[in-house]
Image (cartoon, helix red, strand yellow):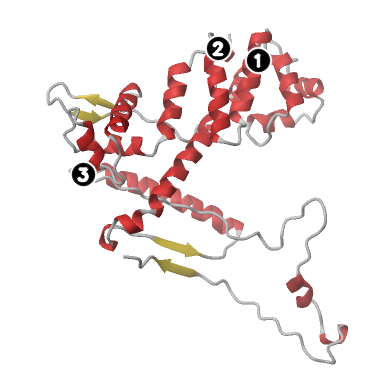
Amino acid sequence: MINIFEYLNYREFLKDAYEERHASDWRFSHRYIAEKAGFDSSMFNKILQGKRNLTDRMVEVFANIFCGDECEKIYFANMVSFNQAKTHSESRQFLEKLVASKECKVENLARDQFEYFDHWYHAVVRELVTFYPYVGDDAALGLMVRPPISASQVKSSIALLKRLSMIKKNEMTGFYEQTQGLISSGFESYNTAVNAYIQQNLDVAQTAMDRFDRSERNLSTLAFGCNEDTYKELVEMVRRFRREVLAKVGACQKPNRVFQLGMQLFPLSDPYPPPQRRGRKRRILGAEMQNVSPCDCDCDGREVLQEMSNTVVEEKECEHD
């Protein structure tokens, strides 16, 4: 039987709980749920796919359908708030409420995973121990990090990485080494934590120009115009490149330094034509001018000249030393 207290993701719980109920009662269907919730029969599937969030009213309805008692309903409501939180602090707040429940089965793992994404240097320490002969000299290891971290930060990081089984002590050599333990940043419950982690890395990258000579860094930026289909192809290219980088790094026999490679792909403008939104329609003067002929305006026969430039691509490599 499905145990709600083994979940941190309400969509996964709803999916498993639905399949269990449907298997024992064919009348328990998407249409049945839609009738109870008062929405279209396709809405439940969109919720499971992450295309729609639950409103407060829907949380109550779904809790009545899938939860057995008041304790389960409270846990379900906190789980929804946890998954749909907009900030890292909100996520942590509702995570604490989840793991405070004595029935919760994921306390240690959840807290440790959140803590891993709390600080950018945990990943750096994990990589450092692959080639630095760390035997407990926290201050020395902290000075290896750029920018440096304190001995206490190193100590807490080592303890966390051990709890997550991401590093272990080699009893033969006495040194720590990396294991295959991994945390998936794609897990929906941790999206806000991962966003905070990425923000920390961007902050560290901002200071790289001042901390390193140009020969030790490679910073560049690229601005371009394209359409949605090309954008999707670019996203896939970035994914392939990341896999190639990981394969190349995995083949490196003697690493001696930790690097960070940041890749960002995001819009710098709205699409044209702009999407239709509720409220007043946006007025675009250029589009109006494009459709005006000389005889339709009071310009005394003068032509309206508008140059429509082709896509302009600008690439700039940082020259700062």
Location of the N terminus by quadrant is: top right
Q: Nearer the viewer, residue 316 or 207?
A: 207
- The quarter holding residue 308 reads bottom right
Tag 2–tag 1 contact (CB < 8 Å) = yes
Residue for badge 3: 255
The amino acid on which the numbered mark 3 sits, given as a three-letter code, is Pro
Please name the amino acid that badge 2 sits on.
Answer: Ser
Q: Is residue 127 above or below residue 93?
A: below
Which of 139 and 271 lies nearest the eye of the viewer?
A: 139
Q: What is the number of the mark on residue 101?
A: 2
Label 3: how many residues lie within 10 Å, few (<14), some (14-19) or many (20+)? some
Tell which tag, 2 or 3, sits nearer the viewer.
Answer: 2
Residue at disc 2, secondary structure: loop
Is residue 172 rendered to the left or right of residue 97? Answer: left
All told, the count of numbered labels is: 3
Residue located beneath label 1 in the image: 74
Kindly identify the residue that appears in the image at 29 percent across and 34 percent down: 126
Q: Residue at x 71, y 11 (%)?
A: 25
Position in image of residue 127 (x %, y %): 28, 38
Q: Nearer the viewer, mark 3 or mark 1?
A: 1
> Which quarter shows the C terminus?
bottom left
Task: Tell whether label 3 touches label 2 (CB within 8 Å).
Answer: no
